[in-house]
Image (cartoon, coloured by chain):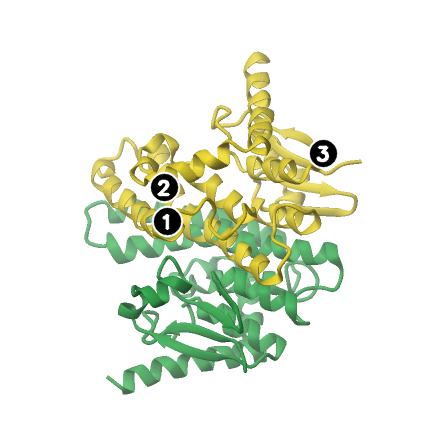
Chain colours: A green, B yellow
Amino acid sequence: MVPIITAFAASPDRGRGLARDMQVRWAFEEVGQAYEVRLVSFAEMKEPAHLGLQAFGQIPTYEYEELYLFESGAIVLHIAQNHTGLLPENADARARAISWMFAAVSTIEPVITQRESAIFTEKNQTWFAERMPMLEDSIRKRLSALSARLGTADWLDGSFSAGDLMIVQVLRRLSSSGLLAEYENLAAYVARAEARPAFKRAFAAQLAVYEGAVLNK
Amino acid sequence: MVPIITAFAASPDRGRGLARDMQVRWAFEEVGQAYEVRLVSFAEMKEPAHLGLQAFGQIPTYEYEELYLFESGAIVLHIAQNHTGLLPENADARARAISWMFAAVSTIEPVITQRESAIFTEKNQTWFAERMPMLEDSIRKRLSALSARLGTADWLDGSFSAGDLMIVQVLRRLSSSGLLAEYENLAAYVARAEARPAFKRAFAAQLAVYEGAVLNK
């Protein structure tokens, strides 16, 4: 028996690996843990069975034996704490890697999803053109700080960790925006992460789901 | 020697306990760990010494012996993992409490800060009145889900945990909005948390800093 996660039956990102199951798949691949995926439709995500696992009707969830978890950050942390390979051995370094995990979802991702949400819901509003540069400047403020911290290092704090995994997944949301390309070292950091065999396996697995969904239409 | 955290020398929330040092103070009080506070001005937060601790120029930070941490969620988790009182003994229940910590900063807080940021930066824009109801509906969507999950329970998952602490601190940001009051059980949940002696001590400590800042002006 292996852990089971949930993922979109038809991901709105069209297989670009931006849905939050990607973080969890990637973590499983980094530590060499097999897993299964249960696909859920948008309708199923709002039904009581799924809401029992995920109060906000989102994916991914994690199920293993008696344990049910939600929130990609918490699931990645759980995997990292129970396997070798995603957190340093040293207790202080582990705590620092967890700081980066929280920074990813709490400090960097919100300014990025704010821009995405404007594109999805306000594109035809009169104010869209005027707000967009404000939203992009909020993103640049975070990227500048992150770029300054990363400097010429390969990873944020020593070896690749769950902190890098979470930060990279958030930065990948910017791929089509042109914003990431403004920071050469951050673009190289994301490319370095995407070249990892574990990333590639996780990406291929989520893409196969999307391609299957298209074929089955 | 005790841990040292950073906090605003003059908090923009005027002592309402909404700055992120409040989470950390509250966690320290819950577990009975003494701590010291180093106050930083807005100018100091952008200087290299602080940026070395906190790449994004924010508060709080945590320093103890050789360890430096940032992100209130990561600091609260570190405190909870190294003391008794904020995480259940059972490993599965601990992992679930951490899911709620991530939900606080990743799923609930972003829709709340989006509204705050509109009030701070777009209040005089022509679109403000039209956007506000959209932003408040995003918040209601999260609050409805949380309210349904909490039901008639005192806390989200058994005893009070670091998950409740983080969720409550995020909900407290809504106190002046009227939105929290729409969900009776959530308003009672926040009041229940604010009645905890540890919360009260933490709140008084951060208020004293603000009152001191006003007196020193």
Residue under the point 59% across and 68% down: A79
Q: Can you say which quadrant of the picture contains the N terminus of chain A?
A: bottom right
Same chain for labels 1 and 3? Say yes or no.
Answer: yes
**Looking at the rendering, which quadrant does residue B2 occupy?**
top right
Label 3: chain letter: B
Residue type highlighted by circle 3: Ala
The residue where tag 3 is placed is B34
Q: Nearer the viewer, mark 1 or mark 3?
A: 1
Q: Is residue B175 left or right of residue A129?
A: right
| Number of the front mark, 3 or 2 | 2
Amino acid tagged 2: Asn
Q: In the rendered image, which residue does mark 2 sit on? A: B185
- Read off the residue under disc 1: B151
* Parent chain of label 2: B
Check contact, mark 2 vs mark 1: CB within 8 A.
yes
- Compared to B99, does A190 lie above or below? below
